[in-house]
Image (cartoon, coloured by chain):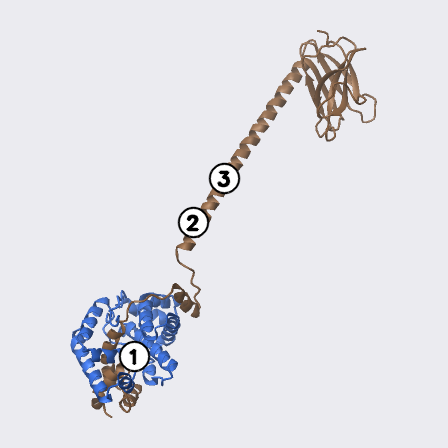
Amino acid sequence: MNCNELREFYELYAIGVAEDPERAEIRAHLNRECEVCMQGIKKAREVAALLEGTAAPAEPSPKLRRRILAAVGVEERRFGWAPFLAAALALSLFAVVYFIGQQGDTQRELARAIAVQRSQNIELTRLNEAFAILNGSDTAVSTFGGGEKQPPKGKVFASPSQGVLLIANNLPPAPAGKRYEMWVIPKGGKPQPAGMFQSAADGTAMHIRHGITAPNESLVAVTLEPEAGSDQPTTTPLFAAPIHGLVP
Amino acid sequence: MTFFLPILMAVRTAEDDTNLVERMQGRDPRALAELYDRYGRVVYALILRVVRDPGIAEDLVQETFLRVWNRVHGFDAQKGSIGPWLLAVARNRAIDYLRSAGGRERNSVEYEETDHPALYTDMEKDILASDKARVVKSAMDKLSPNQRQVIELAYFEGLSQTEMAERMGQPLGTVKTWVRSALKNLRDELGAVVSA
């Protein structure tokens, strides 16, 4: 069939209702890229295209897009609000944790600084006190521990106006639950508790006790006592030094 | 009956289709994503209208887009919108499914026709624009009920004229007359649109 004979079947062909022999003829013309039939079918397709766009609106599921793109190798990330919200939430949580952490760190630093300062103040006060005793015009000094093998050694400074300063070394830290207790023992009298202390890791210790008076020929002694302290010595003194000048 | 309710085709079918086709020919998968964003709903609506099953429709939409993706090299990007070809492929995939599911002979000729994208070029670039839908609806409204029915059976059910005659209990000659008169009326009504 020639193109002119096929012309009236173009639209039937375009909407899929052409029948043989015209259908086969048009197909043959198209397959050999017959310009007349190509143009005719293109024109007929326009009406078909318009009609194809008249279906009632419908919405496919969102998954379909991902399925199609996955088929050509594109892994679509879900681009809804959920990831943004999740990211925002994560960021917020991170920020909260971070700033709380920052704040916590700051507070910890501050607390540590305060503790250090307090400790240094205490130490400074103690040193001032110690110097006051050492420098006291009424201070007398005595030593202890001399001659023994690795004994606790040190000095005791006694001032009736300032108090007693004990400086020791070779005095290992008291074991857990124990502390050192200083005593002022008047000759022939009852030991007076003069405070608890602990030595440092290097075996040094400094202990000050104010408001102590004692007659001459008294002793300053140190014993190992329970942490809570004792009213009377419960162990043999680790060392003792004679003191003078605690007479009020 | 919702048939021929014009779909709101908020699709941009103009100049940027050219760029889209060129990118697809360059195997840019993002261009396929854009094509889907532009035409996915229209294609789905058309296929659903034919197969009336959302699950099957989605499978066929996927086949349609992949078929276009695989054959886009034959499309002349400079000569028109890819939309009409895409819709033709979609319709043929849907009708082909309907015919095979119904034990009917596949319409192999038409199926192969869509393998010639050149047949879909030179079409007015915005032939699928939303304002055209109103004109189409108006043209359809002017058809007689019998004319509308044969167009519906042809477009959305893929029936041959013989099958229509059986379905409608009418002589084949009568059905052929309805089909021809319906097409002529549509052409007359839509002439201004398609020839613009």
Point out residue A147 in the picture as x, y percentages from the top left corner. Answer: 83, 22
* Residue neighbourhood size for the residue with mark 3, other residues' Cα within 10 Å, grouped as few (<14), some (14–19), many (≥20): few
Query: In the rendered image of this protein, does residue B44 appear above or below residue B173?
Result: above
**Mark 1 vs 3: CB contact within 8 A:** no
| The colour assigned to chain A within the rendered structure | brown
* Quarter of image, res A23: bottom left
**Real-space Cα separation, disc 2 to disc 3, in angstroms:** 18 Å
**Real-space Cα separation, disc 2 to disc 1, in angstroms:** 49 Å
Which of the chains bears the disc numbered 2? A
Q: Say which residue appears at 56% left-offset and 28% top-offset.
A: A114
* Quadrant into which the C terminus of chain A falls: top right
Q: Hey, what amino acid is under mark 3?
A: Ile
Q: Share a chain, discs 2 and 1?
A: no
The residue indicated by pointer 2 is A88
Viewer-proximal residue, A113 or A224? A224
| The colour assigned to chain B within the rendered structure | blue
Q: Hey, what amino acid is under mark 2?
A: Ala
**Real-space Cα separation, disc 1 to disc 3, in angstroms:** 66 Å
Q: Hey, what amino acid is under mark 1?
A: Ala
**Mark 2 vs 1: CB contact within 8 A:** no
The residue indicated by pointer 1 is B118
